[in-house]
């Protein structure tokens, strides 16, 4: 297989995959997506159904989580060679219970893949609610790095409800992260009306440094006409009851188009690629299409493709969208002008980039058996016997020193040794550090 250059896509614009999004994400080339928006399950412990008679009738999902239901995902977390992610997931179980650990076990490998497919200029917006937002933020800090956190956006809305022993819960949280400091953000695309809060000659005039009243008024008028950046609390976009009739589908967790317009307008440019790995009724896809972006959607429910195609026909002008045949190798991303095909695919893509994985599946288990037999086996660093879950997958030659994510450069180290070794020390340097510490402990004893 000839590798595509770094950042080259291995899919076509307007592709909808109907499959487990982890399988699809694992097959997308690295660094070829500009913006990710995801509205995953919230661990709400509810079962959602689209009402009969709605366009989404038949769509449903159970937002409940158990460790038995995420065994494969747990193996992926253990295989990730990222001890911070592993310990964050385990810690959530200790503080919030098994259901939260199971939920983060499901989310962790998907967030790792989403980080990989984003371009260095890319951004991710994760839509959640207070049920799990704080745990998801910890997980995102591990995956993206705490310094790449940009906003906790509060999307506030009104609606019926009666909570006699609490304040009414009427907001969602949107966590915004970037891949690097070289991220895309278009302020002019998302400015909102700047309401006049002071009459001419008020606070603005006091800071004007001797300007005339007419000059001050002209400056105020210019500020109001240009608008301002939205704050990180959004109260000007209503929830479901405020959606236009044409955009309502009945999808259980549908979000308004205006919300996605703001996110996509802010963090992508014309022609950029927008990915929604939990696309549902396709709101992010529809917004991307209307704003001149390319898009990819993934959902495990076959109803998602039907509803999204219906919305494209109703909401995206006079274009006629058709289902196109999805070949095994697409070769390019953009479609020719006037080509309005949508590609509905039930086969995940196959990576063709230089960064595609070279390690064996379940290498963690292979290395465990190489350590010997018995319930506890010696750590290659400290030689102390440890249980399977006490070990992290580690790179022998650190990535910072040219190490690769290949079988021959991967080993198991106990969590304690792995924290000391980090991405700085070689194994020789680790053993020297440990010998020094053991000697110091013996002297102090």
Image (cartoon, rainbow, N blue to C red):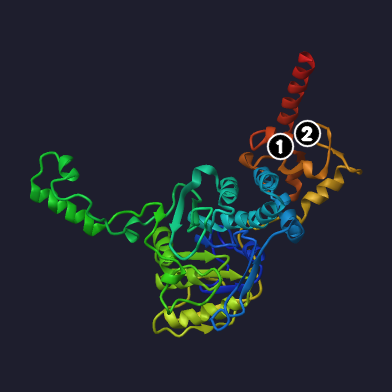
Residue name at image x 55 percent, y 84 percent: 53
Is residue 189 placed above or below 211 in the rendered structure? Answer: below
Question: Residue 41 or 277: which is nearer the viewer?
Answer: 41
- Residue found at x 65% / y 47%: 85
Disc 1/disc 2 C-alpha distance (Å): 9 Å
**In the image, is 415 to the left or to the right of 131?**
right
Residue nearest the observer in this picture, 416 or 339: 416
Disc with the residue nearer the chain's start (1 vs 2): 2
Query: Which residue is the site of mark 2?
Result: 381
Q: Secondary structure at mark 1?
A: helix
User: Picture coordinates of residue 304 (x, y %)?
Assistant: 58, 75
Residue 161, horizontal then vertical, whole percent = 49, 63
**Vertical side of 168 occupied by 213: above or below:** above
Image quadrant where residue 354 sits = bottom right
Nearest the viewer among 269 and 149 is 149
Task: Residue 400: give x, y in percent of width and height.
Answer: 61, 40
Q: Residue at x 74, y 56 (%)?
A: 67
Q: Which residue is mark 1?
A: 418
**The N terminus is located in which quarter?**
bottom right
């Amino acid at each position: 297989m000839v590798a595509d250059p770094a950042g080259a896509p291995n899919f076509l614009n307007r592709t909808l995959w109907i499959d487990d999004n982890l399988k699809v994400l694992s097959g997308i080339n690295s660094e070829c997506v500009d913006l990710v928006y995801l509205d995953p399950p919230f661990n709400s412990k509810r079962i959602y159904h689209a009402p009969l008679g709605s366009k989404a009738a038949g769509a449903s999902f159970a937002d409940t989580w158990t460790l038995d239901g995420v065994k494969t995902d747990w193996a992926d977390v253990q295989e990730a060679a990222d001890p911070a992610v592993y310990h964050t997931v385990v810690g959530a179980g200790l503080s919030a219970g098994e259901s939260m650990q199971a939920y983060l076990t499901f989310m962790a490998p998907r967030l790792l893949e989403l980080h990989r497919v984003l371009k260095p200029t890319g951004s991710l917006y994760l839509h959640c609610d207070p049920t799990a937002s704080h745990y998801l933020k910890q997980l995102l800090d591990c995956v993206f790095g705490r310094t790449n956190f940009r906003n906790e956006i509060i999307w506030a809305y009104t609606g019926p409800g009666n909570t006699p022993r609490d304040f009414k819960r009427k907001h969602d949280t949107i966590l915004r992260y970037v891949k690097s400091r070289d991220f895309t953000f278009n302020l002019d695309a998302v400015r909102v009306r700047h309401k006049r809060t002071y009459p001419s000659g008020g606070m603005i005039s006091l800071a004007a440094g001797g300007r005339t009243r007419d000059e001050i008024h002209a400056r105020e008028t210019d500020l109001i006409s240009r608008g301002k950046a939205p704050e990180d609390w959004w109260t000007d976009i209503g929830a479901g009851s405020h959606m236009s009739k044409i955009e309502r589908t009945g999808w259980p967790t549908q979000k308004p188009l205006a919300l996605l317009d703001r996110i996509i307008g802010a963090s992508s440019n014309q022609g950029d690629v927008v990915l929604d790995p939990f696309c549902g009724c396709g709101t992010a896809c529809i917004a991307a299409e209307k704003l001149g972006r390319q898009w990819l959607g993934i959902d495990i429910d076959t109803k998602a493709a039907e509803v999204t195609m219906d919305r494209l026909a109703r909401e995206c002008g006079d274009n006629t969208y058709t289902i196109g045949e999805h070949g095994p190798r697409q070769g390019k991303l953009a479609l020719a002008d006037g080509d309005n095909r949508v590609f509905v695919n039930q086969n995940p893509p196959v990576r063709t980039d230089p960064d595609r994985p070279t390690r064996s599946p379940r290498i963690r288990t292979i290395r465990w058996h190489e350590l010997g037999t018995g319930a506890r086996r010696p750590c290659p660093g400290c030689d102390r016997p440890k249980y399977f879950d006490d070990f992290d997958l580690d790179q022998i030659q650190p990535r910072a020193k040219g190490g690769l994510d290949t079988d021959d450069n991967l080993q198991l180290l106990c969590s304690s040794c792995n924290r000391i070794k980090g991405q700085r020390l070689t194994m020789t340097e680790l053993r020297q550090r440990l010998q020094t510490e053991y000697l110091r402990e013996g002297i102090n004893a």
